[in-house]
Amino acid sequence: MSAGLMDWAGLMWMLMRALMQALIGWSDALLVALLVLPVLAMLLGFALGGRAAERIALWTLPLGLAVALAIGALVLHQGMPLEYAMGGWAPPLGVALRVDGLSAALLLTTALVITGVGLYARADFATPSGVAERRASLAFWTLLLGLWAALNAVFIGRDLFNLYVAIELLTFTAVPLVCLKGSPENLQAALRYLLFALLGSVLYLLGVALLYGAYGTLDIAQLAAAVRGSAEPAALVAVVLMTAGLLAKTALVPLHLWLPPAHAGAPAAASAVLSALVVKGSFYLIFKLWLDLLPPQYGQQIAQGLGALGALAILFGGVLAIRQTRLKMLIAYSTLAQLGYLFLVFPLVLSPVTLLAATGEGTPPAWTGGVLQLVSHAFAKASMFMGAGLIAIAMGHDRIGELGGLVRVLPVTLTAFALAGLSLMGLPPSGGFAAKWLLLRAGLETGQWWWMLVILGGGVLTGTYLYRVLAVAGFSGGESAPRPLQPVARSRELIVLGLALVSLLLGLLPLSSFEVLKIGREGDETAAVEALTQPAITGAVWP
């Protein structure tokens, strides 16, 4: 029997190798498909109408997920990034696409979350036969596909102007999702979101213009080499302007005023996408600017400022979440707080201790912890928002104080909410625990103990506001279960539970599995260490 199993394993290994060899020849087409597939589906759905748009979107979901899986498998198999110069024109004349270990992980996360959201949203945005098409259904499915294409473009782009186009597409597909209900409150929230986003766009584009004027290229790799070779005052000014604009789109405190009403007022499926993915797109660009484009001596002081804003977001968002009376508003303020952890990555990664250690084996703990926080939060928050939508359907409201007996009405949904909450709190064995433990370890190794206090305090605040919900929903309401106003399909509950389980199971992966994040970054780390020997920004740029 053991010989038979070995033969079967050998056959499967040979098949996998043959598949990988076949995929290598299609790598360029796969990169293009990341953009073309959702865009074509969006345009076709818009042209054919709401009923067709739904079917087209549902067919596109597994195809897009398969493309993301294939690209991730190729990056892992080859141990090197995938690159493609569109039309055969290399930068700066042409546009190059690139997928390294980090972007492969984010592409797969995006595909999984959007697939889950799309399947969940069928009940809310379906157009049955014999029923007149609704404008909201057509809008949702086309916007979801456009948003997917924009996120893919953000994660694989290398040109700062093309990334501007991608982040604008992301904005103009996300804003309408906020006001799909059409109420005055939703329209006001969408307009506020739009104003902050447009302000961010102006600042970002101004920074792009400064960089192009100084260096004559907008390709990130070429800019990084040029900045290391010849420091210009415009480089720091431009990146600071671009960062300020992207902070407005990410909703980092104090530029957060648009996020809570927008995320809380949107339909549950839209809220899940906005919180899990959309704000991560602009954060990813900040990540690229400070960790890939600029040498570390530019950012070590500013990184402390970004970390301080992140710490403020963790504490401020946690306190405000505790004070909320509506479940979706509580989850929205939780997003505000959880985003703060991502900005603690900058002072921890740009520490000289971390940079010197990065040239050795393994990825730095702060780097791995930041990416794991981003991914685990995406799955957990998508699960929580969609779970809140099911609670509102069953109970007719989302008032926290009146959710007594919910555990007997929606036990699977409440279980999923609790599991996702474990990840947000950072309790083992969740992905959030692994992320926050790695950030704590990085704080200890770099001697930045103050960030450790913020992380621990944020965990206490998260546990407090989640306990409020679970205590009422699970341990009050008397002996009899409240009667649900509308039935909730078990399939929708299982989708919510599945996403929560992913956020939990990420913590069970061995840390060695996250070495994939280092693919495509070895040269960046070496250049960063070499840059530490160069004069600081005050001496290299300013006269």
Image: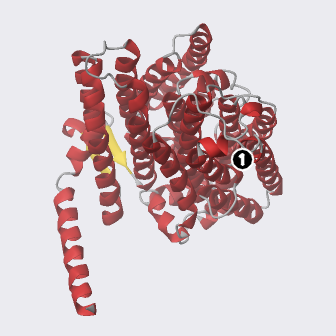
Q: Mark 1: which amino acid?
A: Gly
Q: Is residue 345 left or right of residue 103?
A: right
Nearer-the-camera pick, 297 or 504: 504
Q: Quadrant of the N terminus?
A: bottom left
Name the residue tied to disc 1. 474
Is 112 placed above or below 19 here? above
Q: Is residue 116 visible?
A: yes
Look at 76% across and 28% down and name the residue there: 325
Nearer-the-camera pick, 299 or 410: 410
Q: Is residue 232 visible?
A: no
Is 543 placed above or below 202 here? below
Look at 46% across and 57% down and name the residue there: 521
Q: Quadrant of the C terminus?
A: top right
Residue 294 in picture, x, y percent from top left = 56, 43
Residue 51 in picture, x, y percent from top left = 27, 21
Residue 429 in picture, x, y percent from top left = 63, 64
Residue 110 sits in quarter: top left
Look at 26% across and 16% down and name the residue there: 130
